[in-house]
Protein backbone atom coordinates (compact mmCIF):
# COMPACT_ATOMS: atom_id res chain seq x y z
CA UNK A 1 0.00 0.00 0.00
CA UNK A 2 1.55 3.22 -1.16
CA UNK A 3 5.14 1.90 -1.27
CA UNK A 4 6.45 5.24 -2.56
CA UNK A 5 5.15 7.04 0.55
CA UNK A 6 7.01 4.60 2.82
CA UNK A 7 4.22 4.35 5.39
CA UNK A 8 2.44 1.01 5.11
CA UNK A 9 3.86 -1.66 2.82
CA UNK A 10 2.74 -5.14 1.83
CA UNK A 11 5.04 -7.96 2.91
CA UNK A 12 5.02 -11.04 0.68
CA UNK A 13 2.00 -12.86 -0.61
CA UNK A 14 -1.31 -13.30 1.28
CA UNK A 15 -1.31 -16.14 3.82
CA UNK A 16 -4.28 -18.47 4.23
CA UNK A 17 -5.36 -18.36 7.88
CA UNK A 18 -7.61 -21.01 9.45
CA UNK A 19 -10.81 -20.12 11.31
CA UNK A 20 -10.92 -23.58 12.90
CA UNK A 21 -9.41 -23.58 16.42
CA UNK A 22 -6.44 -25.92 16.69
CA UNK A 23 -6.07 -26.37 12.93
CA UNK A 24 -2.72 -25.04 11.66
CA UNK A 25 -2.58 -22.68 8.70
CA UNK A 26 -0.61 -25.31 6.77
CA UNK A 27 -3.81 -27.41 6.56
CA UNK A 28 -5.74 -24.66 4.72
CA UNK A 29 -5.09 -25.92 1.16
CA UNK A 30 -6.82 -29.22 2.00
CA UNK A 31 -9.76 -27.71 3.96
CA UNK A 32 -13.13 -26.93 2.32
CA UNK A 33 -13.54 -23.36 1.04
CA UNK A 34 -14.76 -20.88 3.66
CA UNK A 35 -12.77 -22.37 6.57
CA UNK A 36 -9.71 -20.29 5.75
CA UNK A 37 -9.32 -16.64 4.85
CA UNK A 38 -6.47 -14.90 3.02
CA UNK A 39 -4.56 -12.50 5.27
CA UNK A 40 -2.22 -9.91 3.77
CA UNK A 41 0.67 -8.99 6.10
CA UNK A 42 1.73 -5.33 6.21
CA UNK A 43 4.40 -3.43 8.08
CA UNK A 44 5.02 0.24 8.77
CA UNK A 45 8.22 1.55 7.22
CA UNK A 46 9.99 4.66 8.48
CA UNK A 47 9.93 7.70 6.23
CA UNK A 48 13.45 8.56 5.04
CA UNK A 49 13.17 12.30 5.71
CA UNK A 50 10.52 13.62 8.06
CA UNK A 51 10.01 16.53 10.41
CA UNK A 52 7.93 16.38 13.59
CA UNK A 53 6.99 19.48 15.53
CA UNK A 54 4.45 20.23 18.18
CA UNK A 55 3.70 20.98 21.76
CA UNK A 56 2.58 18.98 24.78
CA UNK A 57 1.27 20.55 27.94
CA UNK A 58 0.34 19.09 31.29
CA UNK A 59 -0.66 21.03 34.37
CA UNK A 60 -2.37 20.27 37.63
CA UNK A 61 -3.61 21.88 40.81
CA UNK A 62 -4.41 20.08 44.06
CA UNK A 63 -5.95 21.85 47.04
CA UNK A 64 -6.69 18.86 49.30
CA UNK A 65 -10.48 19.00 48.98
CA UNK A 66 -10.30 19.15 45.20
CA UNK A 67 -8.01 18.89 42.23
CA UNK A 68 -7.89 19.82 38.56
CA UNK A 69 -5.62 18.70 35.75
CA UNK A 70 -5.25 19.68 32.12
CA UNK A 71 -3.24 18.00 29.42
CA UNK A 72 -3.05 18.56 25.71
CA UNK A 73 -0.94 17.77 22.69
CA UNK A 74 -0.70 19.09 19.15
CA UNK A 75 1.79 17.35 16.88
CA UNK A 76 2.45 17.88 13.19
CA UNK A 77 4.49 15.58 10.99
CA UNK A 78 5.59 16.10 7.41
CA UNK A 79 7.29 13.86 4.87
CA UNK A 80 10.00 16.16 3.52
CA UNK A 81 10.33 14.18 0.28
CA UNK A 82 6.64 14.34 -0.75
CA UNK A 83 5.44 17.36 1.23
CA UNK A 84 2.50 15.34 2.58
CA UNK A 85 1.57 15.03 6.25
CA UNK A 86 2.62 11.84 8.01
CA UNK A 87 -0.28 9.42 8.28
CA UNK A 88 0.53 8.03 11.75
CA UNK A 89 0.86 11.30 13.68
CA UNK A 90 -2.00 11.41 16.21
CA UNK A 91 -4.60 14.17 16.00
CA UNK A 92 -4.82 17.07 18.44
CA UNK A 93 -6.02 16.05 21.91
CA UNK A 94 -7.01 17.90 25.09
CA UNK A 95 -8.28 16.52 28.38
CA UNK A 96 -9.41 18.21 31.61
CA UNK A 97 -10.17 16.46 34.90
CA UNK A 98 -11.98 17.95 37.88
CA UNK A 99 -12.29 16.04 41.14
CA UNK A 100 -13.42 16.56 44.72
CA UNK A 101 -12.58 14.75 47.95
CA UNK A 102 -15.21 14.30 50.66
CA UNK A 103 -15.50 13.06 54.26
CA UNK A 104 -13.18 14.01 57.09
CA UNK A 105 -10.38 11.75 55.89
CA UNK A 106 -11.05 12.63 52.23
CA UNK A 107 -11.52 8.95 51.44
CA UNK A 108 -14.34 9.57 48.94
CA UNK A 109 -13.25 10.98 45.58
CA UNK A 110 -15.75 12.04 42.91
CA UNK A 111 -14.87 13.61 39.58
CA UNK A 112 -15.33 14.06 35.86
CA UNK A 113 -13.03 14.02 32.86
CA UNK A 114 -13.68 15.88 29.61
CA UNK A 115 -11.73 14.84 26.49
CA UNK A 116 -11.68 16.44 23.03
CA UNK A 117 -9.86 14.79 20.11
CA UNK A 118 -9.46 16.29 16.65
CA UNK A 119 -10.03 14.50 13.38
CA UNK A 120 -7.20 12.55 11.79
CA UNK A 121 -4.60 14.64 9.97
CA UNK A 122 -5.57 16.00 6.57
CA UNK A 123 -3.46 15.66 3.40
CA UNK A 124 -2.39 12.09 4.21
CA UNK A 125 -2.80 8.83 2.32
CA UNK A 126 -5.61 6.79 3.88
CA UNK A 127 -6.85 3.21 3.65
CA UNK A 128 -9.75 4.44 1.52
CA UNK A 129 -7.33 5.54 -1.23
CA UNK A 130 -4.84 2.70 -0.71
CA UNK A 131 -2.12 4.02 1.56
CA UNK A 132 -2.51 4.33 5.31
CA UNK A 133 -4.87 4.29 8.28
CA UNK A 134 -8.59 4.86 8.05
CA UNK A 135 -9.60 8.52 8.46
CA UNK A 136 -11.24 9.32 11.80
CA UNK A 137 -13.58 12.14 12.79
CA UNK A 138 -13.06 14.33 15.85
CA UNK A 139 -15.00 13.56 19.01
CA UNK A 140 -15.62 14.66 22.58
CA UNK A 141 -16.10 12.42 25.63
CA UNK A 142 -17.38 12.86 29.17
CA UNK A 143 -16.33 10.32 31.83
CA UNK A 144 -17.33 10.18 35.51
CA UNK A 145 -15.42 8.42 38.27
CA UNK A 146 -15.63 7.80 42.00
CA UNK A 147 -13.55 5.90 44.53
CA UNK A 148 -13.84 5.20 48.22
CA UNK A 149 -11.13 3.88 50.53
CA UNK A 150 -12.74 2.28 53.58
CA UNK A 151 -9.28 1.69 55.08
CA UNK A 152 -5.79 0.72 53.89
CA UNK A 153 -7.00 -2.75 52.92
CA UNK A 154 -10.50 -2.24 51.45
CA UNK A 155 -11.41 0.15 48.64
CA UNK A 156 -13.98 0.45 45.87
CA UNK A 157 -14.11 2.30 42.56
CA UNK A 158 -16.80 3.15 40.05
CA UNK A 159 -16.61 4.74 36.59
CA UNK A 160 -18.90 5.71 33.76
CA UNK A 161 -17.03 6.08 30.48
CA UNK A 162 -18.51 7.79 27.42
CA UNK A 163 -21.43 9.14 29.45
CA UNK A 164 -23.11 10.68 26.38
CA UNK A 165 -22.84 7.39 24.44
CA UNK A 166 -20.92 8.96 21.54
CA UNK A 167 -19.99 6.80 18.57
CA UNK A 168 -16.29 7.28 17.83
CA UNK A 169 -13.23 5.44 16.58
CA UNK A 170 -9.79 6.14 18.00
CA UNK A 171 -7.05 7.05 15.55
CA UNK A 172 -5.31 3.99 13.97
CA UNK A 173 -8.14 1.68 15.12
CA UNK A 174 -10.50 -0.06 12.73
CA UNK A 175 -13.39 -0.89 15.05
CA UNK A 176 -15.48 1.78 16.81
CA UNK A 177 -14.96 2.18 20.54
CA UNK A 178 -17.62 1.06 23.04
CA UNK A 179 -20.51 3.35 23.82
CA UNK A 180 -21.65 4.02 27.38
CA UNK A 181 -19.61 1.76 29.68
CA UNK A 182 -20.12 1.35 33.42
CA UNK A 183 -17.44 -0.33 35.54
CA UNK A 184 -17.10 -1.00 39.23
CA UNK A 185 -14.66 -2.86 41.42
CA UNK A 186 -13.73 -3.72 44.99
CA UNK A 187 -10.16 -4.29 46.15
CA UNK A 188 -9.42 -6.25 49.33
CA UNK A 189 -5.84 -6.78 50.52
CA UNK A 190 -5.57 -9.90 52.67
CA UNK A 191 -1.87 -9.54 53.43
CA UNK A 192 0.98 -7.08 53.04
CA UNK A 193 4.67 -7.73 52.60
Image: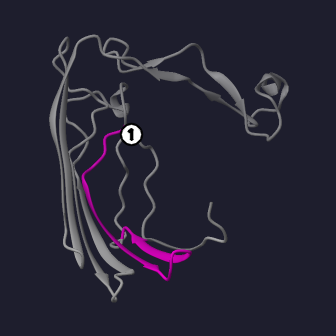
Q: Residue at x 33, y 79 (%)?
A: 110
Q: Residue furthest front?
A: 193
From the image, tell me which residue sits under label 1: 172
Which quadrant of the figure contains the N terminus?
top left
On screen, residue 148 versus residue 154, left or right, reads left
On screen, residue 40 versus residue 88, left or right, reads right
Q: Could you tell me residue 127's position as x and y percent? A: 38, 32
- 174 part of magenta stretch: no
Q: Could you tell me residue 172's position as x and y percent? A: 38, 39
Observer-nearest of 186 and 164: 186
- 156 part of magenta stretch: yes
Q: Residue at x 23, y 46 (%)?
A: 119
Q: Could you tell me residue 42's position as x and y percent? A: 50, 23
Q: Could you tell me residue 159's position as x and y percent? A: 43, 73
Q: Residue at x 37, y 51 (%)?
A: 169
Task: Name the main secondary structure of what is drawn in magenta.
Answer: strand
Hey, which quadrant is residue 51 in on the image? Answer: top left
Observer-nearest of 109 and 21: 109
Observer-nearest of 95 and 78: 95
Magenta range: 134-162
On screen, residue 136 versus residue 41, left or right, reads left
Which quadrant of the figure contains the C terminus?
bottom right
The vertical placement of 147 against 126, above or below, is below
Q: Residue furthest bottom?
A: 103
Judged from the image, the secondary structure of the residue bearing numbered disc 1 is: loop
Q: Residues within 10 Å of mark 1 (few under 14, many from 20)?
A: some
Amino acid sequence: MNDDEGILCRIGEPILTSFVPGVPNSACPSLPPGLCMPFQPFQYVNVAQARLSGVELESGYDRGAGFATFEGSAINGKNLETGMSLATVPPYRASATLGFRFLDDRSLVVGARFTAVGSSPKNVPTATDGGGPLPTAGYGLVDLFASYAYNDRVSANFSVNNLLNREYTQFLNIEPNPGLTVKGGITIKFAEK
